[in-house]
Amino acid sequence: MSDSESIAAGYAFTGPALDLGALLWDGACLPDAQIRIPLPMLNRHGLVAGATGTGKTKTLQLIAEQLSAQGVPVFLADVKGDVSGISAPGVTNDKVAGRAAEVKQEWTATGFPAEFYALGGIGHGIPVRATITGFGPVLLSKVLQLNQTQEQSLGLIFHYADTKGLELIDLKDLRAVVTFLTSDEGKPELKNIGGLSTATAGVILRSLTAFEAQGMADFFGEPDFDTSELLRTASDGRGMVSVLELPAVQDKPQLFSTFLMWMLADLFHDLPEVGDADKPKLVFFFDEAHLLFNDASKAFLDSITQTVRLIRSKGVGVFFVTQTPKDVPGDVLAQLGNRVQHALRAFTPDDQKALKATVKTFPNSSYDLEEILTGLGTGEAVVTVLSENGAPTPVAVTRLRAPESLMGPIDATTLDAAVKSSSLYGRYAQAVDRESAYEKLTTAEPAKPEEAAAKASPKAPKEDESMVQQVVGSGMFKSLARSVGTQIGREITRSLFGTARRKR
């Protein structure tokens, strides 16, 4: 058996699989040697990497289309604004027809069922919001660019708010709690929170104020987006493609990358264990993945690694999309069993170092990968996936198929019409601002002078400590006690990223 036949045999799966393209060998495309990914292995995670302009987005689109056709819901982060076309049939031309003929693809123009979302409603899409409580202190620390000490202190502030019944819905709620803790009335409470200094609380408060001044308030609030919406299928049985439109927040990379991690963590909290299933419940594509890991704390990276490692057993696959594998920490990279590596550039010493590092992440093969990876054309990639028995397949240089949906964005009018006609629009479009920590801390009435005098008198009999004093000590207010009386001591359960667990 020749080398090319041996490679082709490694992709001859018996069960359902996604078709990526045809094998390239000695410069020739072999249409009968199809390169595929077994459908059950899509929850073993993956990496799509390559330099700018090499076809990563089209690869995402190709995989997402076939997952949808197999009844698997898909989540796509559309950072550049060019994935919305997955909802519309593609347009044939000589280039598409030629590619289809080369790889033995029966190309048919097809649109796929899609929902469009936007963070906080900024841009085109159904608004996606999270409460501060649901988001949690670890993820919020990443967004606020806090150091490790400040991150730990923010966790203590969340703990305080949870135990005192001060609901953290939006940024002004958290700012109100921190402001109170740094005020004359709240400083006694601050002393009771181990390890939290006035200076650190002040830094957090300034970070929150600056963050809010940058227009970030819209992303946090209610209605809290229910991530189970991402698991839906269309009426015809195809998986729903959820497209998060991010062009309007391209200048806030840490925010949108951290929000994507919140979505994944929220799904992890609520999905049951399913083990090895016939197909994934959801495949999640994490575009511009390097933004997630930049300047990340050890606690944050540990939580990402744990989430990626464990969410597989809940039927969710995660694909990270970035320029080189070195953008992804080694512990996370080790969890990514399916690899589609587009061309890399080697113009600088750093590029050459990244190229050598990338080659080392692939199984041994008969290819000269250093030479091949710098010579791949657009829409070509080096592929290795997990076979049906979980073993890595041979490395295969592949000419990829063409997506069947529109390779480009749909127009804004069509996109807006799709958003407003969605059954989810009425549920999430309008923001809600209910009573929470901000209102409780700013509308309370001060204690009456005679009550303060009675407390100060040494002859006054000692009474049971009031609910007000339990919540904030002697300087707090009566009305706050009334509002939190039924919530004292009921701390919110948190895990992984410090995100709140909720029942659905």
Image (cartoon, rainbow, N blue to C red):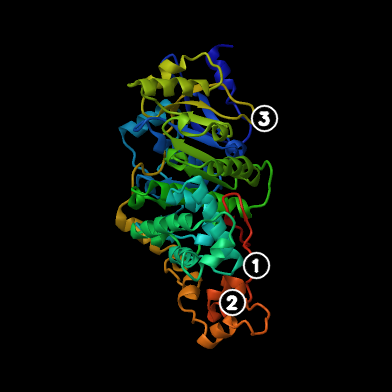
Mark 2 vs mark 1: which is more N-terminal?
A: 2
Q: Position of residue 429 (x, y in %)?
A: 42, 66
Q: Position of residue 118 (x, y in %)?
A: 40, 56
Q: Are marks 2 and 3 in contact (CB under 8 Å)?
A: no
Q: Position of residue 390 (x, y in %)?
A: 65, 30
Quarter of the view holding residue 105:
top left
Element type where label 2 sits in the image: helix
Query: Is residue 184 shown above or below 330?
Result: below
Label annotation for residue 490: 1
Give the residue type at disc 2.
Val
Q: On the rendered structure, is 251 left or right of 392?
A: left
Mark 2 to mark 3: distance in Å?
62 Å
Quarter of the view holding residue 16:
top right
Element type where label 1 sits in the image: loop
Mark 3 vs mark 1: which is more N-terminal?
A: 3
Query: Is residue 443 shown above or below 110?
Result: below
Mark 3 neighbour density, 10 Å: few (under 14) some (14–19) many (20 or more)? few
Find disc 2 in the rendering and name its residue.
468
Q: Nearer the viewer, residue 38 or 155?
A: 155
Give the residue type at disc 3.
Asn
Mark 2 vs mark 3: which is more N-terminal?
A: 3
Find disc 3 in the rendering and name its residue.
389
Query: Measuring 37% from the left and 47% from the top, which residue is drawn there?
Result: 85
Query: Is residue 357 shown above or below 437?
Result: above
Q: On the rendered structure, is 185 left or right of 481?
A: left
